[in-house]
Image (cartoon, helix red, strand yellow):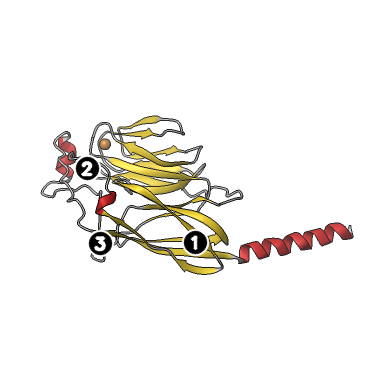
Amino acid sequence: MRFSMMKSVFLLGLALAVSAHSGDIKGKVIFEGTPPPEQPIRMTGDPKCEMIHKGETLMTTNFVVGPDKGLQWVFVYLKEGVSGEFPPPKEPVVLDQVGCHYVPHVFGIQVGQPLTLRNSDPLLHNVHIIPKENKEANIGMPLVGDLPHVFDKPEVMITIKCDIHNWMYAFAGVMPHPFFATTAPDGAFEIKNVPAGDYKIAFWHRRMAEQVLDIQVAEGPMEQNVTFNESMIKGRKKKAE
Ligand SMILES: [Cu+2]
C-alpha cells in the first residue's frame, strides 16, 4: 500500500518534471535570390471554374515570398528524436476545394486525425490522394459537402490532386506527433510544447531539396531560422500547376 502510494507520488513528480521541460520553436524561413515567377493558371478545362474567377487570374503558389523574403508553404517538422505516444486530436483538418483551388496548399495532420475533404464549389471535383506509404484514394465529389478521410501511417509528403482540374495540387505531411507547422505568408512558423531534447528539424518545400538541421530544445522559447536559395531549386517545370 505504502509502496504503491510512493510509486504514484514518484510517477506524478516525474510527469510534472517532464511536462515542465518543454520549449517552443519559433522561426522564419527565408528565400534568398529571385524566385521563379508564378504562372497564371488557365482554367480553360472547365468553364464553371472560369466563371467563378471571371475577370481575375489565379496564380500558382510555388514560391510565395513576402516583402521580408519570408517563404510561405514550407512544411516544418521534427523528423527524428521524438519519442512517446501522441494521441491524434479529434478536431479535423479541413481541406477545402474552393474556386477550383485547394485551401490550404500545404498542411500537416497527425496519423489517425480526421481529415475533412470539403467541396465548396457547385461542380465536380475529385480528390486523388497519391501516397507511397498510405492507401491511395480517388474520391469523386460532385456536390457541395464534406467527406471524411484518415491517414493511418506517417508520411512526408503526400500529393493530393484533382484529376479533373490539372492545376489543383495540395500537399499533406502526416506525422506521428504534433510537432509540425506550415510557414505563414511572412515565412514564420511556431511549434509549441516540444519536450526538451535533441532533434532533427526538417524544412520541406515543394520545389527545393529538404533541409535538415540538428537542434537542441531546452525549456522556454528558442529561435530557429533557415534560408533557402535559388541554387536549391529542383528541375523547373514550365507547366502551371
Ligand atoms: Cu477539381
Can you give x and y, in whole percent of width and height, for residue 57 in the image? 14, 48
- Which tag is nearer the camera, tag 1 or tag 2? 2
Residue denoted by label 3: 66
In this picture, residue 142 sits left or right of residue 149:
left
The disc placed on residue 192 is 1
**Measuring 13% from the left and 50% from the top, which residue is drawn there?**
56
Which is nearer the eye, 37 or 176? 37
User: Callout 2: 10 Å neighbours few (<14), some, many (20+)?
Assistant: few
Q: Is residue 49 above or below residue 193?
A: above
Contact? badges 3 and 1 (CB < 8 Å): no
Amino acid carrying mark 1 in the image: Lys
How much space separates mark 3 and mark 1, taking CA atoms?
A: 24 Å
Residue type (three-letter) at the residue carrying disc 3: Gly
User: Does the residue tagged 1 have its C-beta within 8 Å of any atom of ligand 1?
Assistant: no
Q: Is residue 42 left or right of residue 167?
A: left
Q: Which residue is located at x 54 percent, y 60 percent?
A: 194
How many numbered marks, from 0 up?
Answer: 3
Q: Is residue 209 above or below residue 6?
A: above
Quick check: 140 above or below 93? Answer: above
Which residue is outermost to the right?
A: 1
Task: Give the image location of residue 150, x and y in percent.
Answer: 47, 38
- Residue 205 appears in view: no
Q: Secondary structure at mark 1?
A: strand
Decide: marks 1, 2 in contact (CB < 8 A)?
no
Which residue is at the front of the view, 213 or 17?
Answer: 213
Counting residues from the start of the chain, the first of labels 3 and 1 encountered is 3
Residue 231 percent across, percent down from the top left:
26, 51
Name the residue that disc number 2 marks. Answer: 236
